[in-house]
Amino acid sequence: MRRLFFAIAVLAVATAGISASFAAVHHAKTLTFAERFAPALDLMAKQ
């Protein structure tokens, strides 16, 4: 019985984590190259 409860709990946590991951990817804004690397480019230009 304890093993069944543990398996259900692990499955629930894994499902929640996977769905949260997909939601984060779905809502993420795709950045251009300049937006993503602007801080690094500024530092390289100062050297």
Image (spheres, rainbow, N blue to C red):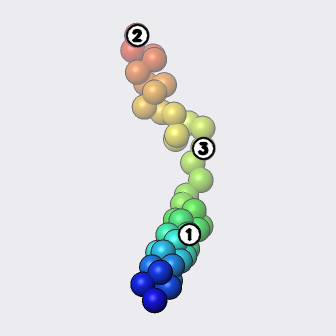
**Residue at numbered disc 2:** 47
What amino acid is found at the position of numbered circle 3 in the picture? Thr
Crowdedness near tag 1: few (<14), some (14–19) or many (≥20) residues, C-alpha within 10 Å: few
Determine the secondary structure under disc 3.
loop
Q: Quadrant of residue 25?
A: bottom right
User: Mark 3 and mark 1 in contact (Cβ < 8 Å)?
Assistant: no
Determine the secondary structure under disc 2.
loop
Disc 3 to disc 2, C-alpha distance? 24 Å
**Residue at numbered disc 3:** 32
Mark 3 and mark 2 lie on one chain; the one further toward the N terminus is 3
What amino acid is found at the position of numbered circle 2 in the picture? Gln
Give the tally of numbered discs: 3
Q: Which mark is residue 18?
A: 1
**Residue 4: horizontal and vertical position, in percent?**
50, 85
Disc 2 to disc 1, C-alpha distance? 42 Å
**Residue 7: horizontal and vertical position, in percent?**
51, 79
Crowdedness near tag 3: few (<14), some (14–19) or many (≥20) residues, C-alpha within 10 Å: few
Who's the residue at 55% across and 58% down the image?
29
